[in-house]
Amino acid sequence: MTNIASLAGVAALIGDPARAAILVTLMDGRALTAGELATAAGVTAPTASGHLGRLLDTGLLALERQGRHRYYRIASASVAALIESMMSLSGELSAAAGRVKPVWTGPRDQALRRARLCYDHLAGEVAVAIADGIVARGQLDFGPDGGVITERGRNLLAELGVDWGSGRSAIPRPAAFCLPCLDWSERRLHVGGLIGRAMYDGFARRGWVRRCKVGRTVSITSLGASELNRHFGVAST
Amino acid sequence: MTNIASLAGVAALIGDPARAAILVTLMDGRALTAGELATAAGVTAPTASGHLGRLLDTGLLALERQGRHRYYRIASASVAALIESMMSLSGELSAAAGRVKPVWTGPRDQALRRARLCYDHLAGEVAVAIADGIVARGQLDFGPDGGVITERGRNLLAELGVDWGSGRSAIPRPAAFCLPCLDWSERRLHVGGLIGRAMYDGFARRGWVRRCKVGRTVSITSLGASELNRHFGVAST
DNA sequence: GCGATGTTTCGGCCGCGGCCGAAGCATCCC
DNA sequence: GGGATGCTTCGGCCGCGGCCGAAACATCGC
């Protein structure tokens, strides 16, 4: 029964519009100050502070204090993955109920749908296409443990300059290593976890992708478009 | 913004203790009457009726009316998968917060942890071990689309008498076909979707597993133990 | 130290929503 | 038809919790 209580507790926490707005705002993996989050959620600082406190001690958010600022961020990749998949389902449900017309028409949404950050790794069409390519080429297998990089895959990643903690000799197994993450807009899996993060970092370092100043959207540079196509078979548009 | 609203809406729906109890009760895939659910949630019939109505028209539950009974069930495998993974995360969080002592000691919980139903397919240690075995033997690959049965896998399933809709000639691709499902107690993936369902049905038909009269727990028969070990390498305990 | 800025705590208001009992439908059985 | 059973609708109570303004606390820059 206590399971039910904790389930309901976490769900209720996400279930308030202001808190949901805070969580979604933080889905780009950045750490924002309490004030910024208050603005994003459309509430005053005291209200936001209360919400942040609750999110914090339930473990959904983590805190880094820096001088007089307090930076809040999503606590872990698991939390981010849960929110991404809840957005996926809730979007589907409200579309089915006809409550929400497919909002997917504006140019900004198009870009978001194309490529965005999911906490610390890529999501969207591009991310799913990369996952497609990497699996099809036998460089990565998803499995019950979340995913394993094959020998071929490790060579590729090394060649790309993706650092995924090469200290390990054996193939790492923890689920967080290569977390399959249900893509909110695509409703298919993309690669999260340490591998997902390392790949995004590598892409960013090479100038293939560039995050927008605000929001989760990520743009693919022209170099990135051709390189992603070359290495993973990602179609240009 | 409307995304946030629908996210919060679904979460708030799950976030009430009575509704959460209803949903968890239905996680065994059975369809129960309003009265039974009221009892399970510990509320009166009118209260339950209100909750059921809301769960219904948000699309989390589905309704089958039969005479003067109205049978409610989880609306889809996606909903079940979401709840299973929310239970997984919330359990982890409350354990981390020290709010809930690891409840995992009682014999009933042991059994639940070992094997249970997740909507319409197996979950628990046994299910994860089966997924392990089936992937290790190259009979199934998880991928961005959720999973594909290889030629070898199809032969095995046919041999086991598992009917997974053999009408299709090509390898089916919809995500619901072989949905990776985050196991609540194991925090690793097991096989859901049509394949997961077909496998469970096959096992049940052959007398390898038997569901308990009440609750989600599934017991493995002694025949089942040896057969699951032989075919999938599932360890006996 | 002192004011400026960022954040949390406190107190109080208010409304949403969960809860129940009673009454109203619907369906079945005899 | 009439009575039993299952479920929902209605009306009203009540408390939790979201919200804000004011004040307290913390930190920085000077």
Image (spheres, coloured by chain):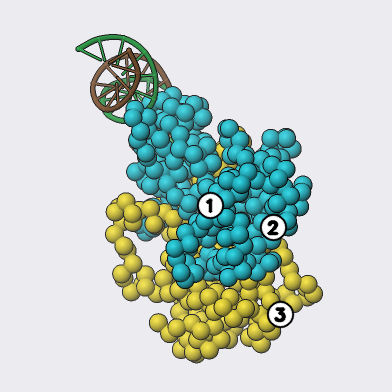
Chain colours: A cyan, B yellow, C green, D brown
Distance, label 1 to label 2, CA atoms, is 17 Å
Q: Residue at x 49, y 89 (%)?
A: B226
Q: Quadrant of residue D14?
A: top left
Crowd around label 2: few <14 · some 14–19 · many ≥20 (10 Å): some
- Pinpoint residue A204: horizontal percent, then vertical percent: 59, 45
Nearest to viewer (mark 1 / mark 2): 2
Q: Is residue A141 above or below residue B230?
A: above
In this rendering, do the residues under marks 2 and 3 share a single chain? no
| Residue type indicated by callout 1 | Arg
Q: Which residue is mark 3?
A: B151
Chain to which the residue tagged by mark 1 belongs: A
Q: Is residue B89 left or right of residue B159?
A: left
Q: Which residue is mark 1?
A: A197
Q: Is residue A22 left or right of residue A47?
A: right
- Pinpoint residue A131: horizontal percent, then vertical percent: 64, 59
Residue A231, labelled with which disc? 2
Mark 3 lies on a secondary structure that is helix
Q: Residue at x 38, y 47 (%)?
A: A59
- Pinpoint residue B118: horizontal percent, then vertical percent: 52, 66
